[in-house]
Amino acid sequence: MTKRAYNFNAGPAALPLEVLQQGQEEFVNFAGAGMSIMEMSHRSAIYEQVHNEAQALLRELFGIPDNYKVLFLQGGASTQFAMIPMNLLTAGKAASFIMTGSWAEKAIKEAQLIGEAAIAASSEADKFNRIPNLADIQLPANAAYLHVTSNETIEGTQYTAFPETGDVPLVADMSSDILSRPVDVSKFGLIYAGAQKNLGPSGVTIVIVREDLVAASPKNIPTMLRYDTHVKNNSLYNTPPSYSIYLMGLMLKWVRAKGGVSAIEQYNRDKTKLIYDVIDQSGGFYRGFADLSSRSAMNITFRIQTEELEKQFAKESEQQGFVGLKGHRSVGGLRASTYNAVPLESCRALAEFMTDFQQRNG
């Protein structure tokens, strides 16, 4: 195999080499069955064991309480933007949101198609370069739930603490930072995440939902869009993305072998510090986009003095084996996504490239 790329893609994103190699070894003949797991019935005992083991591993690693259900769904987090208000937004209530950027905005727009939506706090005035102060949240009296986007991949901001919402369920899109740090799941009514950043490949969406919220699923919405449908059938009501779930299980085993979520959190901090230090010590050559109080440990967003230099940086970095460093098309600039499986060595290599680029162009 030729040298692997320094993969900083925002998603689908890097997977551990050992996970990919195990998937390769088991690809054709899984568990001695004479077929790939992709060829198996999702009703088979072999697949159900893989399915249930992945659920159990996620529960163990993320500390999910017994009164929460773990669902493996399809359609990405974007489908959850609509599915959540369909299930949780009842007549006379308002879906409430903290507006933090591109993904929060998408969630709000979908909720508005279902019913009333309210902005409880926003950082739009600061061009979404920070998470709003929790003290500024104004939750409406008729709030059905409060929705937060725990990490904005495009702007590169992340919550360091979550709001206390009392009896109002807290709902979180954790697509880009789930399992990157310990979280008190009991503070949330529902957590959801696309797997393709920290949990595995694309194709499976995780929903962690409190049992009492499942019981309230309305009966007048389509069967596939009701949480109780998937709870009753252990996420096997229809054919699941079986291979994606299998690879997610391998990824969860990798996290456990690394020492669990707390160890992964420290590993991520060590990785991102290498890059943030270059930005902070560059004398203004590199400018971080996110406010220091809200910097993401998953997506490092930054600019260089001119757009021409940014284009040159992107071109030269690609020539050196770096992938995915262009910023999102909606905001421009540069972005390094440093999810769980991005190796420390890749971040060190990027920091060295950034230093060298500044020395040659500063």
Image (cartoon, rainbow, N blue to C red):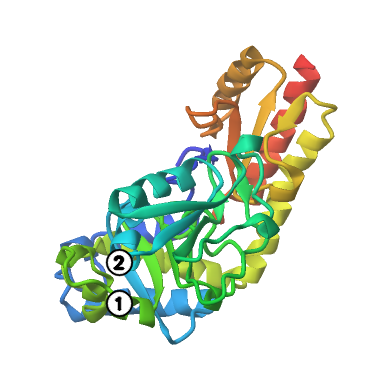
Determine which residue is flagged by label 2: 87
For residue 36, say whether it is visible. no
Q: Secondary structure at mark 2?
A: helix
Q: Quadrant of the N terminus?
A: top left
Q: Are marks 2 and 1 in contact (CB under 8 Å)?
A: yes
Q: Is residue 168 left or right of residue 86?
A: right
Q: Within 10 Å of the Cα at label 1, are there few (<14), some (14-19), or many (20+) other Cα atoms? A: some
Q: Quadrant of the C terminus?
A: top right
Determine which residue is flagged by label 1: 216
Across and down, in percent, residue 246 comes to 33, 66
**Three-letter amino acid code at disc 2?**
Asn
Q: Nearer the viewer, residue 200 or 284?
A: 284
**Three-letter amino acid code at disc 1?**
Ala
Q: How many marks?
A: 2
Q: Earlier in the sequence, mark 2 or mark 1?
A: 2
Q: Nearer the viewer, residue 97 or 116?
A: 116
Q: Residue at x 65, y 70 (%)?
A: 262
Q: Is residue 26 left or right of residue 349?
A: left
Across and down, in percent, residue 355 comes to 77, 29
For residue 268, say whether it is visible. yes
